Amino acid sequence: MENLIVCKKCVMDNTATEIVVGDDGVCNFCKSYEVLANDTINRPDDIKQKELQDQLAEIKQRGAGKEYDCILGVSGGVDSTYLALKAKQWGLRPLVVHFDNGWNSELAVKNIENIVNKLCFDLHTYVIDWQKFRDLQLSYIKASVLDLEAPTDQIIFSALYKIASKKGIKTILSGHNISTESILPRSWYTDKLDYVNMKDIHHKYGTTSISGLPKLTLYHKYYYQHVLCISTSSLLNYIDYNKKSVKDEITQNLDWKDYGGKHHESVYTRFYQSYILPVKFNIDKRKAHLSSLIVSGQIGREEAAKEIQSPPYDVKAIADEKEYVAKKFSISVDELNRYIEQPNRSHSDFRTEYDKDVRFYYFLFRVIVYIPVRVLRLFKVLETPKNPKFY
Ligand SMILES: [Zn+2]
């Protein structure tokens, strides 16, 4: 890329179109991190500890008398594995859910087996209808849009909410953490929980029905968050989270095995992040991952800059990987190449949850349910949701 502008503190550059590098040479991502960290992870330990204890007490109280007090989706990756270990130490009783979308590496599956066996947690494996899910994923590739992980993320969340609602679970534990995931340019992903967008992309490029797959429409989100009051807790933000020592801890306690890059527990995610994103969209997600680690003081800039110099994918193995991916989709490598070489399209070229008619009907719905919901809350038939993410 010509005229590459790089932040002197992290390794973000103007392949993220929204970057603004100040006169001091430091980018807006670094500056936003400082503000966020000062409000959260950089606060004094005693304050964070007190808040953690309050949150744990509330999760236990809301789950009292039930089989589980929380639900935890595990991928076999570092964050969810460590969260499972901490949940055990904190005395939580999670139902562990693993989403089998047909792409998990053997190592990831082994890691998950170790988590549940060593921590004596119940495991619910959510197996998706592969024919339908494959058609949905392939429709995103054919549509030439950016966020090929949106179907997986959306269906994981839909499944977690669905299982939580069935089991009366009120808390979803999230492995998201500011220490290792704070930097991610908005232009590098889409609103992953936009069902309207997913439906329209599949409607235009899919070949089979996807009915029966778990859904997360605006109305589902309202029901789960405002009626059932299922909330999400990101507990890793209350403790020191250092990637290297966390990896050591889970290796020692849970026989966890490393599988390489971030989120490479899925073969599809690895192919997407290390090949499609850099080659098709000129996005190298390692820059965001490593910058997050730099700003939180877990890795030096020099080390990160050196890592980025290596190709994002294994040049020798990519032909085999492409063949594997094409075979899983029941298409030829030529066909896969053709889709990758198409001009890129924006998610907003398709319908979204922000379209005027969609917002209008949702607004009408909110008006209609406003008074009944308020009355039910007044009489304590319904709880009052805490910090709902969806409105
Ligand atoms: Zn920066």
Image: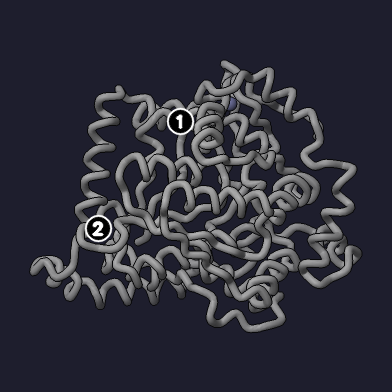
Q: Is residue 362 above or below residue 26?
A: below
- Residue 101: where, in percent of width, then height? 62, 65
Percent from the top left, x then y, of residue 72?
A: 42, 54
Of the two numbered discs 2 and 1 in the rendering, the one whose residue sits closer to the viewer: 2
| Residue for point 29% across, 30% down | 48
Q: Earlier in the sequence, mark 2 or mark 1?
A: 2
| SS under mark 2 | loop
Classify 10 Å Cα crowding around label 1: few (below 14), some (14-19), many (20 and above): some
Q: Is residue 281 above or below residue 103?
A: above
Whether residue 182 is visible here, answered yes or no, is no
Residue displayed at 33% across by 69% down: 167
Q: Nearer the viewer, residue 391 or 157?
A: 157
What amino acid is labelled 1 in the image? Tyr
What residue did someone put label 1 on? 241
Check the picture and name the quadrant holding the C terminus.
Answer: bottom left
Q: Position of residue 347 (x, y in %)?
A: 62, 61
Is residue 102 found left or right of 220 in the rendered image?
A: right
Residue 26 visible in the displayed image: yes
Q: Is residue 338 left or right of residue 118?
A: right
Picture quarter containing residue 10?
A: top right
- Residue 35 vertical position relative to residue 166 in the rendered view, above or below: above
For mark 2, what is the residue?
A: 63
